[in-house]
Image (cartoon, grey):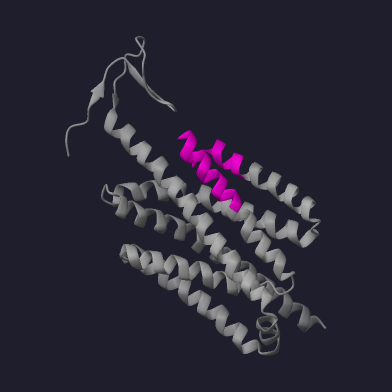
Amino acid sequence: MAAPTSIPHTRPTPEGTVFDPDATAEFDVDALAVEDQQRSLLVRVFSLVALGLITSAGVAYFAVQNSNVYENAIRHSIGFQIMFFFEVAVVAFISKYMTNFTISMAWIVFIFYSAFNGISFSLFFLWLPPSAVVFGFFLTALTFGVMALYGRNSNCDLGSPRSLGMMIGLGVVLMILLNVAFGHGNPFYATSFLGIMFFAGLTAYHVQDIRNLEWEFEDDDATRDKAALIGALLIYLDFVNLYMLMMRFAGQARNQNLRNR
């Protein structure tokens, strides 16, 4: 690697490098390039999370339209249990091997996993209107998509606390406006709010991990796509892990209630 280049009397700004005669400290141009690449990586991750959520919403909507899916799930509890444990197995497999995937395999796994979650989540949330689950996916995808466009056009750091706070605020505003416009009830507010808060929180948690992916992959578009896919999978996998934890607690509470009767 070439030696870092330093330029005197300049300073970095969100708009780029500017000349400042009062600036005495020199800075590393290579470090600025890495920061720019990390910002670009976060934009790609946000875009892919939006794509994954849109895929989940589309598949969940298809499942909603096919009422037999829900009737069979209710009648045959063994199928419900098989899907639950298959979800656990998929999470374990992707968590262990995702860094070894080729780029094409990473794309296939990401799309498959997003589609599978559309079916599994719409079944697991049977106590909610299925359309509310679809709407929660859609609204969270819309929030990530708008933030990705904002990050691409403004060149801001989507991983900063300010940007993450802006994302939550944007999601809440969209949630209120769309739910009021469509006359939705409380379940739609619940799925929308939980989706926004969970994904925003997980993004904040994984921001540094995602930035570090920039150092692990070579400097070309193809491997950056792989880094972005892994970053999006990190967020999605943790979302599913949180959901599994909620399901476990819900199951324990249900069993306790049955024993008390």
Residue 228 x/y as whole percent: 40, 53
| Quadrant assignment, res 95 | bottom left
Residue 80 x/y as whole percent: 62, 83
Locate the N terminus and report the quarter of the image it occupies. Answer: top left
| Quadrant assignment, res 40 | top left
Vertical side of 16 occupied by 90: above or below: below
Residue 182 in view: yes
Residue 157 in view: no
User: What range is drawn magenta here?
Assistant: 142-167
Q: Is residue 154 found left or right of 18 in the rendered image?
A: right
The residue at 68%/61% (across/down) is 135
The residue at 76%/83% (across/down) is 259
Locate the C terminus and report the quarter of the image it occupies. Answer: bottom right
- Comparing 66 with 253, the one in front is 66
| Quadrant assignment, res 163 | top right
Q: Is residue 4 found left or right of 105 in the rendered image?
A: left
The residue at 43%/49% (across/down) is 44
Residue 236 x/y as whole percent: 51, 61
Q: Is residue 174 found left or right of 204 in the rendered image?
A: right
The residue at 78%/55% (across/down) is 182
- For the image, the number of numbered tags is 0
Magenta region, main secondary structure: helix
The single residue placed furthest to the top in the displayed view is 21
Taking the magenta stretch, the answer to whether it contains residue 34 is no
Vertical side of 26 occupied by 188: above or below: below
Residue 222 x/y as whole percent: 30, 54
